[in-house]
Image (cartoon, rainbow, N blue to C red):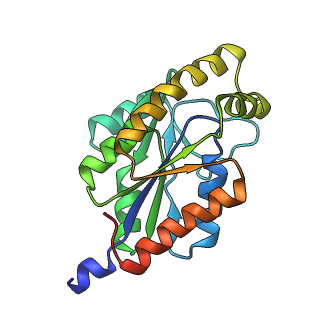
C-alpha cells in the first residue's frame, strides 16, 4: 500500500430506524476513537429547542438545499418524512484527506448512495431489540406527533429489510453500552488491519 493511501481516511456509515439510538452511539464512537469525526448533515427540517446549528445539523432553507443539489455539493441526500437531509461533500473530503475516520449517520437510502461513491466504506446498521422497544423509544423522545411516530414505525420495517441485504454489520441496541462497544470494536478491528472493505 502506498503512503498516500495509507494516510487517507475511511468512511463508516451508521444507519438505523428513528429512535434506535444511533445518534447516541455515533457521538460515543467519536469520543472513544481519536481519529473519528462525525459528519454533520444539512437538513431543511426545523431546529428543535435542544439542537444546535452546526453541532446536531446544519439547518438550511429548502431553496439553499436545492442549490446545493444543483451544484453537486452533497455526497448523498434524501427526503425523509417531508424534510430533506444531506451530507456536505466538501466536509467529508476534507476529513478524509486529514486521515480521519468519517462517521456518517444517515439512512439506508443515503448509505447506498455513499457506498456507490466510496466502495470501501463500511456499513453498520443499528437494530432495535423489538418493534415494541422501538415504539417506546420514539414516543419517549417527545419530538414527534402520533402521526409521525406511526410513519416512522411503518418505515422502520422496510428500512431494516433493505439494510439486511447490503450492510456488512448488524448491531442490536438492547444494551446501549454493549452496542457502543460492539461498534467501536468493529471500527478498531478495521483500523488495525488498515482496511475497510
Apparent side of residue 166 relative to residue 173 in the rendered image (left or right): left
At x 25%, y 51%, the residue is 117
Above or below: residue 9 compared with residue 149: below
At x 42%, y 28%, the residue is 63
Residue 61 visible at all: yes
Image spot of residue 61 (x, y percent): 50, 31
Front residue of this view, candidates 139 and 162:
162
Above or below: residue 49 compared with residue 172: above
Picture quarter containing residue 78? Answer: top left
Picture quarter containing residue 182? Answer: bottom right
Apparent side of residue 128 relative to residue 64 in the rendered image (left or right): right
Front residue of this view, candidates 119 and 40:
119
Which quadrant is home to the N terminus? bottom left
Image spot of residue 150 (x, y percent): 63, 17
At x 67%, y 60%, the residue is 178
Image spot of residue 77 (x, y percent): 38, 37
At x 57%, y 73%, the residue is 33
Front residue of this view, candidates 103 and 180:
180
Picture quarter containing residue 112? Answer: top left
Above or below: residue 141 compared with residue 39: above
Q: Residue furthest left?
A: 2
Apparent side of residue 119 relative to residue 32 in the rendered image (left or right): left
Above or below: residue 137 compared with residue 38: above
Front residue of this view, candidates 74 and 3:
3
Q: Residue furthest front?
A: 130
Which quadrant is home to the C terminus? bottom left
Image spot of residue 3 (x, y percent): 24, 86
Residue 73 visible at all: no
Amino acid at each position: 500500500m502506498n503512503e498516500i493511501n495509507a494516510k487517507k481516511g475511511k468512511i463508516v456509515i451508521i444507519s438505523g430506524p428513528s429512535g434506535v439510538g444511533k445518534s447516541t452511539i455515533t457521538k460515543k464512537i467519536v469520543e472513544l476513537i481519536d481519529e473519528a469525526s462525525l459528519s454533520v448533515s444539512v437538513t431543511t427540517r426545523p431546529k428543535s429547542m435542544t439542537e444546535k446549528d452546526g453541532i446536531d445539523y446544519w439547518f438550511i432553507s429548502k431553496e439553499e438545499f436545492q442549490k446545493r443539489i444543483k451544484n453537486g455539493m452533497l455526497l448523498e441526500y434524501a427526503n425523509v418524512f417531508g424534510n430533506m437531509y444531506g451530507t456536505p461533500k466538501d466536509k467529508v473530503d476534507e476529513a478524509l484527506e486529514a486521515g480521519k475516520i468519517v462517521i456518517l449517520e444517515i439512512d439506508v437510502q443515503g448509505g447506498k448512495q455513499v457506498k456507490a461513491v466510496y466502495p470501501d466504506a463500511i456499513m453498520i446498521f443499528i437494530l432495535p431489540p423489538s418493534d415494541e422497544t422501538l415504539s417506546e423509544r420514539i414516543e419517549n423522545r417527545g419530538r414527534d406527533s402520533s402521526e409521525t411516530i406511526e410513519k416512522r414505525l411503518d418505515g422502520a420495517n422496510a428500512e431494516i429489510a433493505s439494510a439486511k441485504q447490503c450492510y456488512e454489520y448488524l448491531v442490536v441496541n438492547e444494551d446501549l453500552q454493549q452496542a457502543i462497544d460492539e461498534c467501536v470494536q468493529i471500527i478498531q478491528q478495521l483500523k488495525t488491519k488498515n482496511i475497510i472493505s
